[in-house]
Image: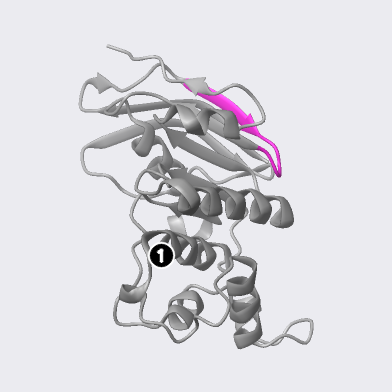
Amino acid sequence: MLHIQNADIRYGDRRLFQPLTLTIAKTEMAVITAPSGLGKSSLLRWIAGLETENMTAEGDIFLNEKAITHLPAEKRKIGLIFQAPLLFPHMSVGDNLGFGMAATKQKQDNGKTRKQHITEALERAGLGGMENRDPETLSGGQKARVALLRTLLAEPEALLLDEPFSSLDGEMRDQMVNLIQSESQRLKLPVLLVSHDPRDHQLGQKPPITFKACC
């Protein structure tokens, strides 16, 4: 479960939105919608623990009942997917996936090797056999799915999505949506999706949360 209590984010004296409280259960997806510039991405960066110049934030973050507000990003167990896939161009698809793989998967566990985890992840995403591909040869939809898999192989306990479908349309968008939904259910992850696209509003189990602009 991911719980955000009284999130209050500012740049200088400017408060981006009225304080926000929300709770997202395991396997649940919550959607936040707002026009550009009201702080959707800033909220995700604060939850993930990423420093942002000139930004100050107040509030509390709990993940599976553990307070993580003051932990560094690498200890929060939060996965964050940006609008752009951000793959390493000098690494193969398989090496990209292995780069962030959790230590538990680097070793043999349940009889599986590192290579097997990568192979199975690609197959679940409809990308079987692409371990040795150059990321630059992939379509936009394929890059997005590889970036998601890399994040999930790091074994996060919650997933944050920053406009992940903005550059995708048609079948590529559907594939990414289906992968996020299936993997979040399989891994029992709470998911927070921010978007201004009306098509994304129906993806949450509850009505979307609308940011209320502040002074």
The x, y position of residue 40, in whole percent, is 38, 32
The boundaries of the magenta stretch are: 20-28
Left or right of residue 82: residue 26: right
Residue at 54 percent of width and 38 percent of height:
61
The x, y position of residue 93, in whole percent, is 44, 78
Q: Which residue is mark 1?
A: 143
- Report the front residue among 44 and 76: 44
**Amino acid type, label 1:** Lys
| Image quadrant occupied by the C terminus | top left
The x, y position of residue 85, in whole percent, is 37, 60
Left or right of residue 113: residue 128: left
| 9 relative to 139, above or below | above
Left or right of residue 28: residue 98: left
| Image quadrant occupied by the N terminus | top right
- Report the front residue among 162 and 20: 162
Residue at 38 percent of width and 71 percent of height:
138
The x, y position of residue 130, in whole percent, is 50, 80
Quarter of image, res 23 = top right
Query: Is residue 196 rendered magenta in the image?
Result: no
